[in-house]
Amino acid sequence: ALPADTAMAFVLVLHLDPHHESLLSEVLAKRSSMPVLQARDETTVEPNHIYVIPPNANMLLSGSMLRLTPRVAHEPHRPIDAFLISLARERGANSLGVVLSGTASDGTLGLKAIKAASGITFCQDFTARFDGMPRSAIDAGLADVELRRRQGLNERRARLFFDRSEAEGAVRAHARENHADALLLPVLRERAKEKIDREVQPPRRGLRQQVE
């Protein structure tokens, strides 16, 4: 299991029945040493907390807040893609995406966005009960790490999140040496957003994401 003091926030986005309340946050709270909350609109994300998407909603990360909008009936519902794309845009190389068991291909474009931003991606492997979602991402070459069922995201794998490419590390070191962090990092962040926009089509009609 992951330690309770990773300094990271964890956001769970699932395909929930839009017509029934979810007890997932209560169930997880009994098994986790971190606080578990069902997200509300404008919830401020804090380290060492777990946030769960509510039913009948879409969710994006905007700055340091979770923003919710109602799910649109009779339209493709891809909440995982929508959230991961927003995560990549807001956090860049500090983003981590995990796609576990599920049908169809939701999550593939989201992991593509995270890869474009130099983040880290994980997928459950063929041991997933429903392998459509992770298999789609793996077949697209988007999984940095493949996880076996019950293997989980252990501390060793989580530390991959803190690794940076040699090029990025050199740029940041140069910025620190020249006291240019305040000027350079916003530029790097904007370039990462531009790269994501080039490689991933933005969600249409608010949060809806069309997978081709």
Image (cartoon, helix red, strand yellow):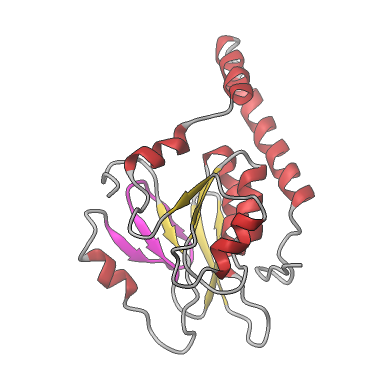
Q: Is residue 58 left or right of residue 188?
A: left
Vertical position of residue 91 compared to residue 111: above or below: above
Residue lying farthest to the right in this orientation: 198
The residue shown at (61%, 71%) is 78
Residue lying farthest to the top in this orientation: 177
The residue shown at (49%, 62%) is 126
Q: Is residue 139 left or right of residue 120?
A: right
The residue shown at (57%, 22%) is 169
Residue 110 appears anywhere in the view: no
Taking the magenta stretch, the answer to whether it contains residue 186 is no
Residue 176 horizontal/vertical position (percent): 55, 15
Vertical position of residue 107 compared to residue 54: above or below: above
Residue 153 horizontal/vertical position (percent): 37, 49
Out of 32 and 111, give the one closest to the viewer: 111
Taking the magenta stretch, the answer to whether it contains residue 47 is yes
Residue 210 appears anywhere in the view: yes
Q: Which residues, given as a range, are shown in magenta?
A: 35-53
Out of 13 and 72, give the one closest to the viewer: 13
The residue shown at (79%, 48%) is 198
